[in-house]
Image (tube, rainbow, N blue to C red):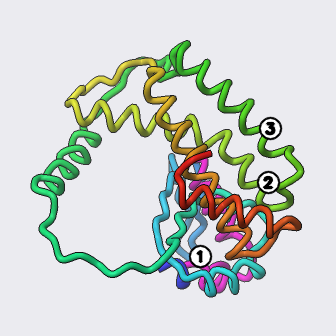
């Protein structure tokens, strides 16, 4: 429940140290933790993933109280467009077991190459095309303020998601040592996800939940069209 998390931000330390911690957790890397009367510890890699739910009205209430540090723009918003009557149906056979197997295999992945994992030439070409599209969208005079800042985060989200997809693919196929290059096919999947799906949810979030767009009428219509038609 994100309401409790947002409501407790900086409530017990009198400063903005909570925000600094969570921002650090987005990028990873070392982080010092000072414990009063108990000494200090060093976290070698503070990498944190936050998954939660919140109602639009509660999000709207907290948004105006949060510091403008880009915390909200680091989330991937998923908007529920409408309420529907649920169906009473059997779960997909084997789905849970398949998920657990992938998670278990992910924990066993090993990569000893100091060069790390990089984009293949084909994946780089796809990424460059994506960046050209992203810049054209950002500077189209439709987006402004915090929404444009959120779109800017998509530049870094794309390679993060490509790496995630690459690792999941290796885990699914039980490849203990993933390929050192991310293939073009994975880059295409990720860029399609960002363009055809994520853009609409970002627009819906900032326009109809937060209400921070000078062109809210136009942006709201575009967001609704994308969410309804699953297209650019």
- The spot of residue 28 in percent (x, y) is 56, 47
**Image quadrant where residue 84 sits:** bottom left
Q: Residue at x 69, y 48 (%)?
A: 153
Give the mark nearer the N terminus: 1 vs 3. 1
For mark 1, what is the residue? 36
From what the image shows, is residue 170 above or below residue 224? above
The reply to whether the magenta stretch includes residue 15 is yes
Distance Cα–Cα, label 2 vs label 1: 40 Å
Query: Where does the magenta region start and end?
Result: 5-28
- The spot of residue 229 in percent (x, y) is 54, 55
Query: Pointer 2 and pointer 1: residues touching (CB < 8 Å)?
Result: no
In this rendering, which labeled residue sits more in front, label 2 or label 3? 3
Give the mark nearer the N terminus: 2 vs 3. 3
Q: Secondary structure at mark 1?
A: loop
Q: Residue at x 66, y 45 (%)?
A: 154
For mark 3, what is the residue? 136
- Tell me if mark 3 has few (under 14), some (14-19) or many (20+) residues whose alpha carbon lies within 10 angstroms of its own: few
For mark 2, what is the residue? 148
- The spot of residue 127 in percent (x, y) is 62, 27
Distance Cα–Cα, label 2 vs label 3: 12 Å
Which quadrant holds the C terminus?
top right
Q: Is residue 44 visible?
A: yes
């Amino acid at each position: 429940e994100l309401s409790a998390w947002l409501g407790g931000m900086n409530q017990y330390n009198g400063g903005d140290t909570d925000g600094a911690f969570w921002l650090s957790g987005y990028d990873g890397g070392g982080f010092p933790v000072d414990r009063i009367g108990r000494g200090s510890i060093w976290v070698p890699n503070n990498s944190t993933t936050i998954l939660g739910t919140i109602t639009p009205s509660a999000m709207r209430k907290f948004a105006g109280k949060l510091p403008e540090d880009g915390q909200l723009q680091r989330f991937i918003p998923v908007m529920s467009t409408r309420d529907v009557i649920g169906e009473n149906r059997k779960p997909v056979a084997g789905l849970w077991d398949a998920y657990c197997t992938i998670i278990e295999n992910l924990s066993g992945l090993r990569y000893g190459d100091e060069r790390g994992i990089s984009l293949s030439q084909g994946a780089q070409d796809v990424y460059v095309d994506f960046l050209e599209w992203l810049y054209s969208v950002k500077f189209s005079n439709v987006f402004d303020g915090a929404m444009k800042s959120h779109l800017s985060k998509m530049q870094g989200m794309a390679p993060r998601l490509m790496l995630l997809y690459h690792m999941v693919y290796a885990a699914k196929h039980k490849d203990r040592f993933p390929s050192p290059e991310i293939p073009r096919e994975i880059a295409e999947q990720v860029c399609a996800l960002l363009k055809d799906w994520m853009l609409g949810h970002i627009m819906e979030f900032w326009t109809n939940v937060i209400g921070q767009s000078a062109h809210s009428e136009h942006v709201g219509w575009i967001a609704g069209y994308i969410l309804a038609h699953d297209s650019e």
